[in-house]
Image (cartoon, rainbow, N blue to C red):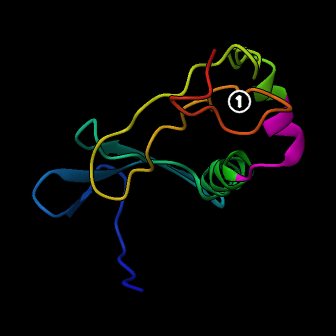
Amino acid sequence: MLTLTRSVGETIRIGDDIEVHVVEVRGGTVRLGFKAPREVTIHREEVYRQIAEANLLAAQVTADTLGALAAFAPAAAPADTAEPVAQDGPGAEPAIQPAAAAPTGHGPVTEGSAG
């Protein structure tokens, strides 16, 4: 860690575009002013830790969360009315076509046996 000594009214530069100004020293407290681009975030350490903890908690997905999100998902069509969807391309499975109903009790129908 780099340690610098500055007095009130003096500045420390970090890179080309960040300035740290010593605004006031009172007892054991130092007031600092910062000039930095908008995309640079500046937080006190305790605030930074709270933000990091909140982000970690927000990134965790639980079964309760998934269940709550499922309530907002569109309802699926009933299975008996759903039409098979053909998918093209390598590795795609062919669409399943419903089997034709075979005559019962007589065996397969041939050209000469239909009457």
Q: Magenta part of the protein: which range?
A: 60-67
Indicate yes or no whether the magenta region holds residue 115: no
The residue positioned 63% from the left and 55% from the top of the image is: 52
Residue 2 drawn at (x, y percent): 36, 84
Instruction: Name the residue furthest bottom.
Output: 1
Q: Which residue carries the number 1 mark?
A: 102
Q: Nearer the viewer, residue 18 or 11?
A: 18
Residue 115 drawn at (x, y percent): 63, 14
Above-or-below relation of 9 to 64 = below
Above-or-below relation of 35 to 45 = above
Instruction: Name the residue furthest left.
Output: 16
The residue positioned 61% from the left and 58% from the top of the image is: 45
The residue positioned 70% from the left and 30% from the top of the image is: 102
Residue 112 drawn at (x, y percent): 54, 29
Q: In the figure, is residue 63 to the left or right of 90?
A: right
The residue positioned 71% from the left and 19% from the top of the image is: 76
Among the 4 quarters of the image, the one containing residue 3: bottom left
Q: In the figure, is residue 37 to the left or right of 47?
A: left
Q: Residues within 10 Å of mark 1 (few under 14, many from 20)?
A: few
Instruction: Name the residue furthest right.
Output: 64
Indicate yes or no whether the magenta region holds residue 63: yes
Count of all numbered marks drawn on residues in the image: 1
Q: Three-letter amino acid code at disc 1?
A: Ala
Q: In the figure, is residue 73 to the left or right of 91?
A: right
Question: What's the magenta bit mostly, secondary-structure-wise?
Answer: helix
Q: Quadrant of the N terminus?
A: bottom left
Q: In the figure, is residue 15 to the left or right of 100?
A: left
